[in-house]
Amino acid sequence: MRKRSVVVALVACTALWGAAGCGSSGNSGAKNSTAGFKVPNVPMQKSVGAGEGKVNLIAWAGYVEDGSTDPKVNWVTDFEKQTGCQVSTKVGNTSDEMVTLMRSGQYDGVSASGDATLRLIASGDVAPVNTKLVPNYRDVFAQLKNQSFNSVNGQMYGIPHGRGANLLMWRSDKVTKPLNSWDAVFSQASQYKGKVTAYDNPIYIADAALWLKAHKPDLGIKNVYELDDKQFTAAVDLLKAQRQNIGQYWSDFSKEQAAFTSGDTTVGTTWQVVANLLHADKVPVKTTLPTEGATGWSDTWMISSKAKHPNCMYKWMNWIISPKVNAQVAEWFGEAPSNAKSCQMTADKNHCRTYHANDAAYFNRVSFWTTPRKQCGDARGAVCKDYSEWVQAWTDIKG
């Protein structure tokens, strides 16, 4: 399992979006509209021929392993042998870095998270994906298809790779009563003053909105990524109050792991992979998907509209979600695979149960990251806060 360096870079995204605004329509655990979203006229590939001999990728660390990290972890070499496509990988450390790299036109594809996908679509930097040319797509969990973070108006713009939820975790030797609500890090956080941790990212504002959606229904929050001025102000105020109890924010999960191990942190948001590592080290922690639900992430392989090796990129997208390979990636990285058949091929036969891979009800409670944009996905129109405003607010929250 590899370190997931997910940090949304703190830059204004209006320049990337132009007239289209900033962000996406957000996810409340189900399919969502992309109202007011204008899609550039980018052609879709109609067939896949012989490979061009190479493919240049941008990926999160741990997604494209060739044995150099660990000799036993290698799904690239067989791909190269079978397709003749030599793989070159640039590790992206942030979503904004990936967006910037894709705009250069030097790469064929990217493993984009939901906070980058619609930016890439809106700017015309990625092309719609012809799923008929990706045979393994038919076995992708239905819940990952045609979502607001990987499609527009029913047209897929990528191939789902994997997903996970942002969970509530606590030291069970310090907190003896099981927790079941995000109250622990918001309304009741003062009980753990200086021992609370939160994800260091503007997208974390959605976590505050999620709590408000459940506990302050008068605000009328329907989608945690579509916040008007009143809703946004409430979320920011909640996070400013939380700030008084935060011991440290985290973006590198190895640092969160160390904080829970040392006891510097007692409670906060986490990923399942962190809990697994802590359990392996005999650190007493417990996790839950709280009653309010949770935010989460789903990554998508997207093809550049300027791809110089499009056939190899299509071959890669089919390869990376093939049952055996997708199982390998999911276990190494620590996530739920996207291919339903992968669950039969994991070395750990409990992997898919641990990560809730085929638990539709579980993921119906997860609001997957999407980039906030000015155009709300409902009748309110262009009154929602875009990502540049989330970035500025996050800076103010942290002080």
Image (cartoon, rainbow, N blue to C red):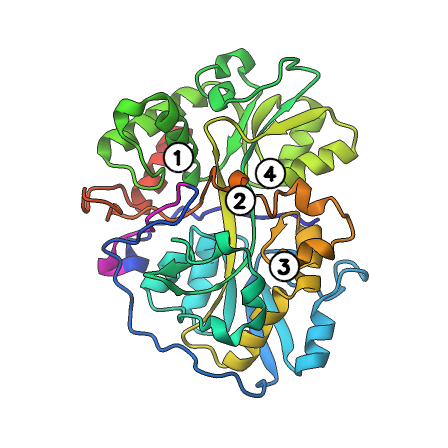
Q: On the picture, is 105 further left or further right than 134?
A: left
In this picture, is 332 found above or below 265?
Answer: below
Q: Which mark is residue 63?
A: 3
Q: Which is more N-terminal, label 3 or label 2?
A: 3
- Depth check, mark 2 against mark 1: the one in front is 2
Region in magenta: 18-28
Q: Are marks 4 and 1 in contact (CB under 8 Å)?
A: no
Mark 3: few, some, or many residues within 10 Å (few <14, many ≥20)? many
Whole-number angstrom distance, CA of label 2 to CA of label 1: 25 Å
Residue at label 1?
205
Near-viewer residue (349 or 126) = 349
Q: Nearer the viewer, residue 138 or 172?
A: 138
> Does any portion of residue 357 appear in the rendered image?
yes
N-terminal-most mark, 4 or 3: 3
Query: How much space separates mark 4 and mark 2, taking CA atoms?
Result: 18 Å
Q: Which residue is mark 4?
A: 271
Q: Is residue 81 above or below residue 161?
A: below
Task: Identify the residue under disc 2.
Answer: 360
**Where residue 18 sits in the image (x, y, percent)?**
25, 60
Who comes first in sequence, dot 4 or dot 1?
A: 1
Q: Main secondary structure of the magenta part?
A: loop
